[in-house]
Amino acid sequence: MIPRYARPEMRTIWSPETKFRIWFEIEAHAADALAELGVIPKEAAAKVWEKGRNAAFDIDRIDAIEREVKHDVIAFLTHLSEIVGPEARFVHQGMTSSDVLDTTLSVQLQRAADILIADLDLLLAALKRRALEHKHTVTIGRSHGIHAEPTTFGVKLASFYAEFERAKKRLLAAREEISVCAISGAVGTFANIDPRVEAHVAMKLGLKTEAISTQVIPRDRHAAYFATLGVIASSLERLAIEIRHLQRTEVLEAEEYFSEGQKGSSAMPHKRNPVLTENVTGLARMVRAYVMPALEDVALWHERDISHSSVERYIGPDATITLDFAICRMASVVDKLIVYPERMKENLERTRGLVHSQRVLLALTQAGVGREEAYRLVQRNAMRAWNGEGDLLSLLKADKEVTRALPPADLETLFDLGYHLKHVDTIFARVFGEGGAEL
């Protein structure tokens, strides 16, 4: 975790203080359940809460114990016994370390998902507002980076809105899948602890019980969670690259907000670089990099090994912290994005009507010309327009083979820009719903 790319709320989830507090709550809730079942004295469970509820766990002390015992959970339990006193002997009855570690990780990933979902809501709100603002702002659509046919900038943004709406649904599903508790003992058989303890702890922590665990919660759940984060990161990169391309000097249809006093280059005072979206592109690469280790963690030996442990100590904090920062940065970029409608119009007109070529092709076929011949006629004139010999409409009007099928007046009707935009309202209604398609 790099502080430069860490927001406080998400960082707190992964702090030692938060981790040890969750460990304590798991142990204390388990003690309550054990007391209700008559396994330990109720007074002992009460004492655990009394001494530990407001205790400030000494991280340095826990670390010192761990250096000696070489076991993090034992180090914590030893320190807890120093706080609670003799009644601490009833803590962790029938439990194994993974009961604590895995359930804690579920809580942390659940809380992280809640923050990421809120982040996505911010991004969705910004995308919707700007999409509606530019619903009818005509721009050129590109395929392979080359001018294709007209669209609107609002349609572009609506496409991203729909994508991040899917991202939110996936993240909600991943949150649901990861929100499980396992307190089932050394190999998951509940040999030394009653399943009702697990059910009680799960209920208290807002989790479900794992249907069947080994010594650990199955790691396919975690793999699905981190894969979802990776897909969201890829969607962020797609949006970032779109903005980066639109900000190129030769295009300049949109650009990141450039604040007063901001400097783009140490050498060139004129520079206004897309640094925020470039940053998001890099962060997206990092989030995706954490997906493969999560997938590889699924295959553990028998009931458990610890090859996943070191991996999750990295990817749990780093993937969620990085994605949190990236989503919020992108939400701000979209919210403040500077859009240049006149430049969009200027760029659209640069190709001298070539964007209407498909409509001419189709009209020729409807007028009785074979498709291959129609394609040849349109392309012949389109290449001349491409080479600067005139605009497409004029060239087509001067081509007797074309006008034999389509008189000049008919050709003129084929160059109506509005033709390409007639279903924008339909698209917006599909994306935002009938009531959300207008400002």
Image: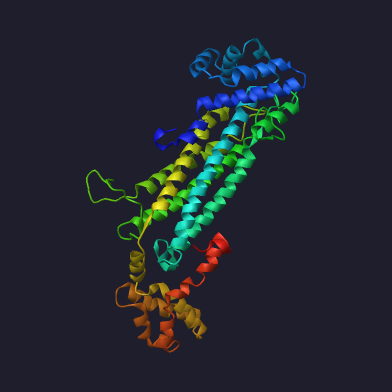
Residue 5, x across and y down, in percent: 42, 37
Which residue is painted at 60% across and 33% down in the image? 107
Tell which residue pokes out farthest to the top in this image.
86
The colour scheme used to paint the residues is: rainbow
**Nearer to us in this view, 169 or 40:** 40
In the picture as drawn, the residue positioned furthest to the right comes out as 38
Residue at 31%, 78% in the rendered image:
390
* In the depicted structure, whether residue 408 falls above or below residue 319: below
Depicted 69 relative to depicted 150: above or below: above
Which quadrant of the rendered structure holds the N terminus?
top left
Quick check: 321 above or below 51?
A: below
- The answer to whether residue 396 of the structure is visible from this angle is yes
Q: How many marks?
A: 0
Residue 411 point in image, percent of width and height: 42, 83
Picture quadrant of residue 84: top right
Relative to residue 106, is residue 256 drawn left or right? left
Residues 1 and 364: in front is 1
Kindly tell me whether residue 192 is visible in this rendering. no
- The residue lying at 51 percent from left, 55 percent from top is 161
Left or right, 426 with reference to 414: right
User: Residue 198 or 382: which is nearer the viewer?
Assistant: 198
Q: Give coordinates of residue 108: x percent, y percent.
A: 57, 33
User: In the visual, does 166 lie left or right of 92?
Assistant: left
Indicate the position of residue 227 as horizontal and vertical percent values.
55, 43
